[in-house]
Image: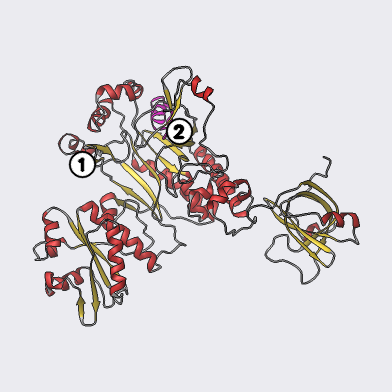
Amino acid sequence: MSYRKRTCTCGELREGDIGKNVTLTGWVDTRRDLGGVVFIDVRDRYGKTQVVFNPQTNEQVHKLAGELRSEYVISVSGKVERRPDGTENANLPTGQIDVMADDVTILNRADTPPFPIEDDVDVNEETRLQYRYLDLRRSPMQQNLITRHKMYLITRKYFDELNFVEVETPVLMKSTPEGARDYLVPSRVHRGKFYALPQSPQTYKQILMVAGMDRYFQIVKCFRDEDLRADRQPEFTQIDVEMSFVEEEDVRKVVEGLIVRFFKEIKGVEIPTPFPRLTYKEAVETYGSDKPDTRFGLEFTNINELIKDSGFKVFSEVVKKDGVVAGFVAPDCGNFTRNQLDVLTDFAKSLGAGGLVWMRVTDAGVETPSEKFLGKETVNAIQRRMQAKTGDLILLISDSWSKAYTILGGLRLEMARRLNLIDESKNDLLWVTDFPMFEFNEQEKRYVAMHHPFTSPNGEDASLLDTGPLKARARAYDLVLNGNEIAGGSIRIHDRALQSKVFNLLGINNEQAKKKFGFMLDAFRYGAPPHGGIAFGFDRICMLLTGEKSIRDVIAFPKTTSAISLMDDSPSEVDPAQLKELHIKIV
């Protein structure tokens, strides 16, 4: 097909181009026929330009314009002219000019799309994902992908300036237990054996430190076969970083520099450093989360000392069992009706609470059904301790340490949403540090790593690995932005004996460790340097920088929450001959 090649994009022409003969290529965005003169907005990823088809300019071209419909692909040529006074479009960068068409070629016709290609399209996500190639024509989606592209460039430039080397690690690797299910790839050549897709390049990047690479980074695809949520995908992208001869502060400084640059170059926002720090214990006891949203208050107060000897057994018995009674003040909510309070109680129960104790602060004093159990003096002491003012509402939860603060964390976020306390214009970053090394899995009756098996214990707590592993703190750190974990890392174990001890605590005996991680333990025998690193959730950072609510909106071809690609219908069945080659039989 012969047609004129474009001379400029659809977002390029301005008043300074008036008088030029130009050629545009793109999609028909809108078509309007006003008394014989046809107006076509031609769109590409750079913008839109209005093209005028006037029969007095070229009757044949005007006739052809009558055939044009939404999403036809065209090439159109003509002279740039100033729009008549009063018809300018101040909302369009090209809104001061028109192109007066004297030639048009239809490069491809289009069926009527299943939804309009508009910025704010009202269509369900399943349809958008099924016709992703149409969804990606919309300007917001294209801008998201452009932002993602800019993040790639910023990342590579930043780490190159700091003498990091980008090293690609294998996509087909050994299956190793790292917390989630592996995606397995059967080997045709080695019958009955499987590769795994990497959950992360963790073992490879540590081996690169043993290899003397010193400073490594990679923008890398990772894979986890786990239940999905709005911010989870079976395949995701992370910025992987590892450094030798460093301590926590060295890693954090490098991380802060990249985040500052992202905000500066993507959003034009200056972020002060260093970022605030909270220990894991402080974060949980203050906000009920190890990734707290600090854009608003509603901080918690522990009242164990006030009620440990009270006659209210719901409280006192919990304290005797080393549990927690704590809560927060909801400002100006003392006028909540009993129905509203019942709804809050039901919400707390949905989070796992046995109940919710509330106290209204009124002009006449503190009003609560629990006064008959606690006594007026204790109730007033609680009000003073929590610094609740007239018109405020006190909300209290009692349970084990972990459960009480987790429930309060969910209740805190719910109240913030109801009271409209979250300032969306804020960018609150903070480090959470001093995580526990281990958690105890009640179902499996064993310790599991809070981060991963390669995280080093705090030097002060090394002896606790023998006497009280659950009390040992890890040299781990997470970076949180507005209640979202966007990066997590640690100083790693570089000593073979210590790594073996941690494996044993996790239920990985010496034989299993040799089978799963023997290559890494062997590498440590030949002079492993102290090292540490971090991995950034690239998709999640991109989501937050673009203001989207789901990482699916910043990934070109994402999966659904059930890990299906609606556009190309994967996963799909395969030819039986392929299974036979792989020595696999579907049962």
Q: Is residue 58 visible?
A: no
* Picture colour scheme: secondary structure
In the rendered image, residue 113, in percent from the top left (x then y), is placed at 66, 52
529 and 366: which is toward the camera: 366
- Residue 212 is one of the magenta-drawn residues: yes
Asked if the residue at tag 1 contacts the one at tag 2, i.e. Cβ–Cβ closer than 8 Å, the answer is no
Could you tell me how far apart the alpha carbons at marks 2 and 1 are, in whole angstroms? 32 Å
Dot 2, how many residues are within 10 Å of its Cα: few (below 14), some (14-19), or many (20+)? many
Which residue is the extreme one toward the front?
Answer: 587
Of mark 2 and mark 1, the one earlier in the sequence is 2
- The percent position of residue 339, horizontal first and vertical second, equals 30, 72
What residue type is disc 1 on?
Leu
**Magenta span:** 196-216
Q: Which residue is mark 2?
A: 216
Q: Position of residue 39 (x, y in %)?
A: 79, 61
Q: Quadrant of the N terminus?
A: top right
Crowding around mark 1 (Cα neighbors within 10 Å: few <14, some 14 to 19, many 20+) is some
- From the top left corner, tell me how far across and down residue 237 is, in percent: 48, 40
Nearest the eye: 531 or 419: 419
Q: Quadrant of residue 31?
A: bottom right
Q: Is residue 120 visible?
A: yes
Does the magenta run of residues contain 203?
A: yes
Q: Is residue 327 above or below residue 141?
A: below
Q: Which secondary structure, mark 1?
A: helix
Please determine whether, in this image, residue 375 is positioned above or below residue 237.
below
The residue at which mark 1 appears reads as 470
Q: Quadrant of residue 386?
A: bottom left
User: Is residue 498 left or right of 33 when viewed as pictured?
Assistant: left
